[in-house]
Image (cartoon, helix red, strand yellow):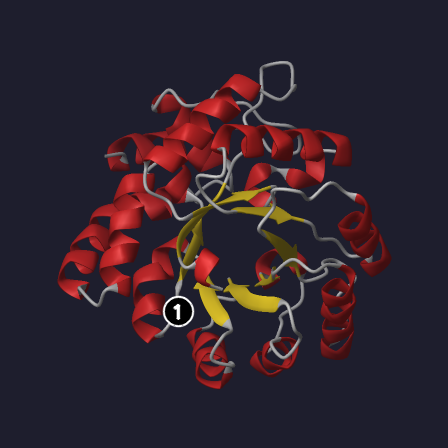
Amino acid sequence: MEKFKGLGVAMVTPFNADGSIDYLGLERLTNHLVDGGVNYLVVMGTTGENPTINNEEQQAILQKVIEINARRLPIVFGIGGNSTAAVVERLKSENLEGVDGILCVSPYYNKPSQEGICQHYKAVSDATPLPVIMYNVPGRTGSLVSAETTLRIAQLPNIVCTKEASGSLDICMDVIRGAPEDFGVISGDDNYTMPYIAAGMQGVISVLGNAYPKEFSQMVNYALDGDFKNAKHLHYKLLPLMKAIFMDGNPGGVKYALNKLGICQNEFRLPVVPVNKTTEKSLDEAML
């Protein structure tokens, strides 16, 4: 779990205008994050538009980030899905050399029971020796992982933490209170990061951190050190931007900001499209 404390960034995937992967943009982004003081990189989360990227492309993106990163930071790779067998097959067959952990979302769309979610993560745990970060994001999956279920899964040997994006402080606190000492709880919601750390979380996997890694990292580290005076100052400085980047979907907002910062192009694969003009205006006003 120590590898995944602090600020992790769910990396966007830069594209060219023709929809191909922009590897130069990916290099700029990786160095921007490493130089910006983040603690680890997350490749092929939902922010990376992974539903539109086939397995071969995902592997190529992963290998490029590993190459550019050159072991400077730990790397987490997203492997998840709503077919347990398919997830297990990827974990067993893909090249995961240089990967420090797996981000595995709770199964989406088929809305499994709590028992089904537990059995899914047991199969994942059995399929890989790598540390696994489970991911509770009911706004995307259509099903909530309860605190009781998370605490059951936390007993599995290599499920090391949960990324909590349920939006429920009650669930988060129940997990923090009941979790084993070596099991981490990290935020999946940028704007709740500071109060969640105050409640006992160990950090965040962030979207905004793509654009402003230095400022977000400073806020997280202040909070983890118990310096909530400085953490609160940065939290409220970043809060308008945290809200603006999600106004018209993710990763539309953060890619708009990254394009303005000269990191990557404002290009997507359908069904994701650029943000609307109202959101652009809000982002322009909020950007640092």
User: Is 64 left, or right, of 212 in this rendering?
Assistant: right
The percent position of residue 235, horizontal first and vertical second, equals 24, 54
Residue occupying image coordinates x 86% and y 57%: 85
Dot 1 surroundings within 10 Å: few (below 14), some, or many (20 or more)?
A: many
Report if residue 239 is visible in the image.
no
Residue occupying image coordinates x 64% and y 68%: 158
The percent position of residue 130, horizontal first and vertical second, equals 65, 57
User: Under tag 1, what secondary structure?
Assistant: loop
Foreground of the two, 247 or 2: 2
Residue 208, above or below 155 = above
Foreground of the two, 50 or 104: 104
Q: Amino acid at mark 1?
A: Met
Foreground of the two, 199 or 68: 68
Residue 147, above or below 283 = below
In the rendered image, the residue lying farthest to the top is 18
Q: Quadrant of the C terminus?
A: top left
Quarter assignment of residue 270 = top right
